[in-house]
Image (spheres, coloured by chain):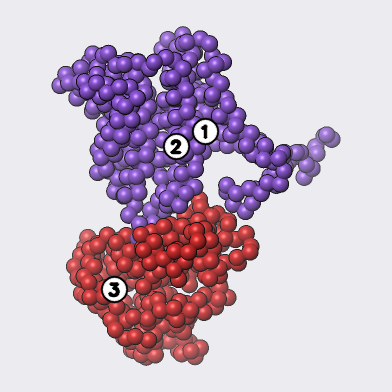
Chain colours: A red, B purple
């Protein structure tokens, strides 16, 4: 794993009126790692992703990607650099069949320039490539599932579709906003190897999660937010042992329970 | 049927659809015929219309129907495949019409040059003027498209430019009725099948995705404003083309070409014919515009009858005519015991 800094967030601050959603949050994202972001509800996790990916304009601070200042770029320009995201509230194209959902990222300037996921965009037609990607992400190729309208898919598939949409773009970083939430234990268990595979493929992952036990199995480092401020960052073990984190977030009983299972 | 017996209608799809929209498995000429019949009926039907209607008055009505159909298909395309509600039919007709009249009378362009020129220039001009409201979401696009034609008419009137309230007279007419009719029929068929194909191309899929979820499209690295602008450009071209042809039929361009009829009737036709089909709005125009002509003999009561028909459709057949017929055509229906 390379340890060079891929994305640097400096003093990011976001105020919604008088509410300080983020206050001078700084951290480095290293190439190839899986970084977990945790924190109680309302601690600014999704706002952080929204500001980095350009969906919300930050009040002050800087985002530097591969040495280039990308602060304030519009969302589609940031995505064009390979910085992609899933949405906490899933955003499929409900009226389109599942495989047609991937035509959109495969048609994007980035995919046409780089060939998309594993160069597939340069090979045959986009319909075929999108079925390949769906198979990679866990859709049964020979079933009717890839051809069903997204509105008819259950939550587990929609979560995978969110990830597939990021993959099709040939991403450098994927920001995952709670991909595990709303899934059963067995569905999460089937997603974990997928995340491992993406990391092996060289994709840097940032995962916002409330499901700590599952997150700590895949995360290299964890960033803890509380009331819009960075509480600490470190390895999952360091986070679990930190008294401030226990105080702010878990409560001592919860920590004991997680330690038991780890 | 025994009394008290419960029956329900069972619907079965004919078995030639495969997995997803627009792909069929055909195994016989009969199935091929079944699939092509509705399309051929539309083509042959439209081509035969001028021959069937001997009366010059009704032939003229057909021309007007087809011009309305350009607007209606454009409205359907923007509303159901891109997610923009346009009330700009009058704006497109007026702009295309005035430009064609100017090109023809002032610059001396012959009829078959000034129509494409007015289509191109008008489409670009309309899109450029609508560009500022494209990044906004919600009702703003509808409001702006409604305001432009109203403003244009008042500006022409107040400043007494472009012929003022008299309009621009002496626009060249078509060589004869047949050229006028068949030009419009071929254009309508071309636009109809072209649009239906376009929404299934990869670019068309991206536009439909913008309608479903524009934020997800941005997250895929695609500039949504540019794609909305492209769709508006296509629609503006269609509307301006209609306007350019219209002034040559009337041999006159005037303020009444910015009238709200051009904005409202296409929407009504889309509701009646069935939105999201492109064909529905075309059928809607074929139905509504002649009805509006027939009702002319009732004077101002015409509007009341017209409204009643629309309200009736909205309540009793809100899906529209085409989806209703499609269902009847594609499915077997039978009564089964519950």
Place residue B217 in its image quadrant. Answer: bottom left
- Which circle marks residue A227 in the picture? 3
Q: Is residue A141 left or right of residue A90?
A: right
Q: Is residue A15 left or right of residue A126?
A: left
User: Where is mark 1, residue-wise?
Assistant: B280
Are discs 3 and 2 less than 8 Å apart at CB? no
Of all chains, the one bearing label 3 is A
**Which disc, if any, is residue B76?**
2
Instruction: Looking at the image, tell me whether mark 1 or mark 2 is earlier in sequence order.
Output: 2
Q: Is residue A143 left or right of residue A164?
A: right
Q: CA distance from mark 3 to mark 2?
A: 47 Å
The residue located at (60%, 29%) in the rendering is: B41
Task: Point out residue B83 in the picture as x, y percentages from the top left corner.
Answer: 40, 44
Q: Is residue A93 above or below residue B146?
A: below
Kindly check if marks 3 and 1 are in contact, taking CB atoms under 8 A apart as contact.
Answer: no
Q: Disc 1 vs disc 2: Cβ atoms closer than 8 Å?
A: yes
């Amino acid at each position: 794993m390379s340890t060079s800094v891929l994305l640097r967030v400096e003093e990011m601050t976001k105020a919604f009126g008088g509410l300080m959603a983020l206050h001078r949050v700084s951290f480095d994202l290293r190439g190839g790692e899986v970084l977990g972001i945790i924190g109680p509800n309302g601690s600014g996790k999704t706002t952080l992703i929204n500001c980095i990916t350009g969906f919300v304009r930050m009040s002050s601070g800087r985002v530097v990607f591969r040495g280039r200042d990308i602060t304030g770029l519009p969302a589609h320009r940031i995505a064009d650099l390979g910085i992609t995201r899933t949405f906490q509230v899933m955003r499929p194209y409900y009226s389109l069949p599942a495989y047609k959902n991937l035509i959109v990222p495969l048609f994007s300037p980035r995919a046409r320039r780089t060939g998309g996921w594993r160069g597939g965009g340069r090979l045959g037609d986009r319909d075929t490539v999108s079925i390949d990607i769906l198979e990679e992400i866990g859709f049964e190729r020979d079933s009717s599932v890839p051809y069903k309208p997204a509105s008819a898919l259950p939550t587990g598939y929609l979560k995978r579709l969110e990830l597939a949409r990021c993959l099709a773009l040939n991403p450098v970083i994927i920001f995952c906003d709670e991909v595990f939430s709303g899934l059963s234990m067995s569905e999460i268990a089937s997603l974990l190897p997928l995340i491992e595979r993406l990391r092996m493929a060289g994709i840097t992952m940032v995962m916002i999660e409330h499901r700590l036990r599952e997150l700590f199995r895949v995360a290299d480092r964890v960033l803890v937010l509380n009331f819009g401020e960075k509480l600490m960052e470190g390895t999952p073990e360091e986070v679990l042992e930190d008294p401030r984190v226990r105080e702010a977030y878990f409560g001592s009983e919860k920590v004991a329970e997680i330690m038991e299972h780890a | 049927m025994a009394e008290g017996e419960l029956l329900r209608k069972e619907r079965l799809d004919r078995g030639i659809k495969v997995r997803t929209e627009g792909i069929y498995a055909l195994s016989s000429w009969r199935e091929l015929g079944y699939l092509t019949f509705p399309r051929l009926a539309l083509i042959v039907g439209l081509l035969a219309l001028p021959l069937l209607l001997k009366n010059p008055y009704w032939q003229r009505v057909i021309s007007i129907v087809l011009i309305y159909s350009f607007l209606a298909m454009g409205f359907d395309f923007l509303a159901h495949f891109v997610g923009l509600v346009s009330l700009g039919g009058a704006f497109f007709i007026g702009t295309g019409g005035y430009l064609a009249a100017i090109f023809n009378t002032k610059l001396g362009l012959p009829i078959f040059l000034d129509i494409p020129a007015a289509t191109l220039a008008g489409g670009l001009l309309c899109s450029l003027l609508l560009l500022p409201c494209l990044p906004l979401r919600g009702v703003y696009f509808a409001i702006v498209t409604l305001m432009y034609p109203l403003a244009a008419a008042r500006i022409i009137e107040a400043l007494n430019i472009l012929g003022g309230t008299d309009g621009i007279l002496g626009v060249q007419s078509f060589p004869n009725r047949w050229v006028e009719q068949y030009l419009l029929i071929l254009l309508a068929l071309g636009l109809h099948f072209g649009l239906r194909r376009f929404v299934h191309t990869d670019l068309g899929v991206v536009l439909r995705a913008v309608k479903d979820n524009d934020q997800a499209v941005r997250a895929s690295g695609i500039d949504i404003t540019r794609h909305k602008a492209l769709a508006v450009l296509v629609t503006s071209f269609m509307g301006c083309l209609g306007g350019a042809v219209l002034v040559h039929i009337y041999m006159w361009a005037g303020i009444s070409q910015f009238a709200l009829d051009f904005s409202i009737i296409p929407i009504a036709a889309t509701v009646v014919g069935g939105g999201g089909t492109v064909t529905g709005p075309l059928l809607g125009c074929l139905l509504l515009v002649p009805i509006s002509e027939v009702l002319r003999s009732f004077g101002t009561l015409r509007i009341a009858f017209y409204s009643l028909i629309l309200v009736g459709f909205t309540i009793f057949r809100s899906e529209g005519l085409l989806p209703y017929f499609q269902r009847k055509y594609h499915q077997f229906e039978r009564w089964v015991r519950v």
